[in-house]
Image (cartoon, grey):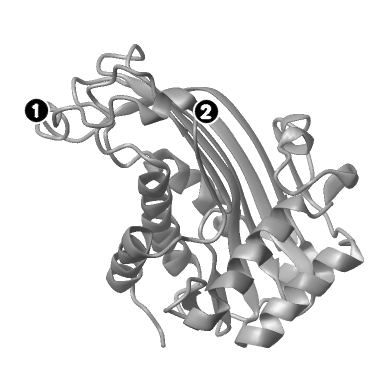
């Protein structure tokens, strides 16, 4: 069943409340303290959150062969972020709504909007038990997510290892990678099992709140986001994005953490790969 933007977000939100989502939800030790802070009376009540982005690092790659045969009418399996780390200080009045699940929900909001703009004819299906995935497959999806993160990829490093992308800071390139057989076989298996062509998989997301940034706090953001042609067992595109976001007005960033990532994800989809020159 095709889901529009609003239903996609609503379903994912319900899933985070009632379903143990695939992947890992981590919190630094201090993230578990003081979560019962009184609601921030200033958060989101004095206008839009405005952020200044600094210390930005990035890496982007596209597979030109996979893009050349992209099927604009295909079905896309949408995974939640496989590994989320949410860190907050012990005392943080702007952090009452901050959590790993809230981060993933907010990323889904941004991802769905950007993806629908880039590929309006594609059908997006949530890879969560009770939605696209049968309830009986919940254990399979959980184990699959763990196996995916542990799978070897670039330079023999695990998919949840961000160092290959950190070392390529500032690089944009087209590249056709040969995937390890085991990883390719896993992608083929997902495609066959659920009748999918593509998969979008945020691999890693780390966000740390900092009340001392800017005028009303801010956060450090890191993500590795990927899209795969599961039928062919290929990486379609991948982006690594890391930056610091500090408030420029007195409205705390107690929501919409993924908003700055929207334009960076859009660049992944909006680049004309056929005429891209590596640099």
Where is mark 2, residue-wise? 243
- For image coordinates 48% across by 80% down, the residue present is 135
Q: Is residue 137 left or right of residue 236?
A: left
Which residue sits at x=58%, y=38%? Answer: 241
The disc at residue 32 is none
Closer to us: mark 2 or mark 1?
Answer: 1
Specify whether 263 is left or right of 141. Answer: left
Residue 145's x, y, as percent? Answer: 64, 60
Q: Position of residue 191 (x, y in %)?
A: 68, 81
| Camera-nearest residue between 55 and 1 | 1
Q: Quadrant of residue 252?
A: top left
Tell me: residue 197, above or below residue 151.
below
Q: Indicate which disc residue 41 carries.
A: 1
In the rendered view of the protein, which quadrant contains the C terminus?
top right
Q: Position of residue 59 (x, y in %)?
A: 68, 39
Q: Dot 2: within a 10 Å radius of its alpha carbon, few (fewer than 14), some, or many (20 or more) residues? A: many
Which residue is nearer to you in this view: 242 or 61? 242
Local SS, label 2: strand
């Amino acid at each position: 069943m095709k889901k529009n933007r609003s239903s996609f977000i609503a379903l994912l939100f319900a899933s985070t409340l009632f379903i143990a989502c695939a992947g890992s939800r981590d919190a630094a030790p201090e993230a578990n303290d003081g979560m019962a802070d009184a609601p921030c009376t200033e958060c989101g009540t004095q206008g839009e959150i405005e952020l200044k982005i600094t210390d930005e690092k990035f890496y982007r790659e596209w597979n030109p062969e996979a893009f050349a045969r992209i099927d604009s009418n295909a079905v896309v399996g949408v995974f939640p972020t496989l590994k989320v780390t949410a860190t907050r200080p012990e005392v943080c009045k702007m952090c009452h709504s901050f959590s790993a699940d809230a981060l993933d929900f907010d990323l889904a909001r941004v991802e769905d909007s950007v993806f629908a703009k880039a590929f309006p004819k594609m059908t997006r299906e949530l890879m969560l038990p009770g939605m696209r995935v049968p309830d009986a497959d919940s254990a399979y999806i959980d184990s699959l997510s763990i196996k995916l993160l542990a799978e070897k990829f670039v330079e023999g490093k695990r998919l949840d290892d961000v160092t290959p992308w950190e070392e390529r800071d500032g690089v944009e390139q087209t590249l056709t990678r040969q995937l390890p057989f085991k990883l390719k076989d896993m992608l083929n298996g997902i495609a066959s099992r659920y009748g999918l062509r593509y998969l979008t998989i945020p691999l890693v997301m780390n966000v740390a709140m900092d009340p001392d940034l800017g005028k009303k706090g801010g956060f450090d953001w890191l993500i590795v986001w990927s899209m795969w042609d599961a039928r062919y067992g290929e990486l379609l595109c991948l982006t690594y994005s890391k930056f610091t976001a500090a408030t420029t007005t007195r409205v705390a960033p107690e929501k919409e953490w993924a908003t700055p990532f929207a334009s960076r994800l859009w660049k992944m989809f909006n680049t004309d790969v056929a005429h891209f020159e590596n640099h």
